[in-house]
Amino acid sequence: MQPFNTNTQTDHDHYLALILEGNRAAASVHIKGLAAQGVSIRDIYENIIKTALYRVGELWESNQITVAEEHIATSVTEGIMNELFYDIVSRQRQARKVVLGCVETEFHQVGVKMVADIFEMKGWDTYFPGSNVPANEMIRYIEKQRPDMVALSVSIYSHIPLLEKMLRLIHHTFDLPVIIGGQAFRHGGKELAEKYPRTRYMADLKELETFIDQYQT
Ligand code: B12
């Protein structure tokens, strides 16, 4: 794999312009072109897609784009991530499962889908029942899947108590490692992980990749 040697600034600006236009075909060609040049999926996710979507948030917050443009930028991105999926799944499976979720009332799911894709790249089977799954339903789902790990995402700071509710329920019911992440923690709350056994906060996909590579039961 070649190092990440593209012009990141230009690449995410270009991607941003295409997703705001809603030009899925061109945005898809752009991303696949980067992958074909040897840019890793992790770099595409972190440096192109995440950076562009964070910028979408700033433009939206300052009323420089409409809600519809923000929606289309996200849906084009999710479409492209779905297209990439087939090529990123590792053919070498690890016989390990992870159940991923957003806490209840949390609708931001792009970050946790990136997390799921990194697990798939590492040969884990991933199960993501979607955003905003009620905590009790998540517990039932974990019971059914019997995963090796649970990964939870939270984007809105005021949803951190809902994450805590979920952590309490999980640790009350199972003895499982849990990883937590999401941009809600940009405003604090990382120490939450220390209150629960086998629970760890991770900031980004690089940290996640290292963690999976070194993971032993
Ligand atoms: C798209 C979007 C939406 C979409 C989401 C659709 C979807 N399918 O996901 C919709 C329209 C639903 C939405 C709604 C809202 N949104 Co919004 N949204 C965004 C936007 C523009 C992009 C989100 C995104 O995909 N980011 C890119 C991903 C890749 O980044 P990420 O989630 O941080 O993930 C990375 C890491 O955090 C990490 N990670 C994430 N999860 C996990 C989990 C684990 C286990 C690990 C290890 C790592 C990890 O990995 C990723 C890669 O590094 C952001 C802007 C922004 N800054 O992100 C605002 C933003 C998140 N939204 C915001 C707000 C306020 C809202 C609303 C309250 C708006 C409203 N008034 O209705 C609602 C709340 C809805 C709800 N109840 O959840 C604010 C949050 C502010 C805050 N402090 O809490 C933001 C920051 C916009 C802003 N600048 O104000 N939103």
Image (cartoon, rainbow, N blue to C red):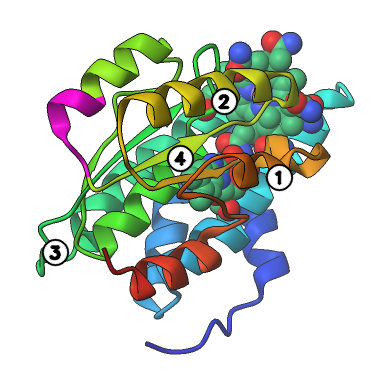
Which residue is tagged 4? 112
How far is disc 1 from disc 2 in space, using C-alphas? 12 Å
**Mark 3: amino acid:** Gln
Mark in the foreground, 4 or 2? 2
The magenta segment: 142-147
In this picture, residue 172 sits left or right of residue 72: left
**Sequence-earlier tag: 1 or 2:** 2
Name the mark on residue 94: 3
Name the mark on residue 190: 1
From what the image shows, is residue 68 above or below residue 212?
above
How far is disc 1 from disc 3 in space, using C-alphas? 29 Å
Mark 1 surroundings: few (<14), some (14-19) or many (≥20) residues within 10 A: some
**Mark 2: amino acid:** Leu
Dot 4 beta carbon under 8 Å from ligand 1: yes
Instruction: Identify the element where label 4 is drawn.
Output: helix
Name the mark on residue 163: 2
How far is disc 3 from disc 2 in space, using C-alphas? 28 Å
Residue 67 appearing in the image: no
Q: Residue furthest bottom?
A: 2
| Residue plotted at (45% across, 73% down) | 210
**Sequence-earlier tag: 4 or 3:** 3
Taking depth in this image into account, of 43 and 171 the one nearest to the observer is 171
Mark 2 surroundings: few (<14), some (14-19) or many (≥20) residues within 10 A: many
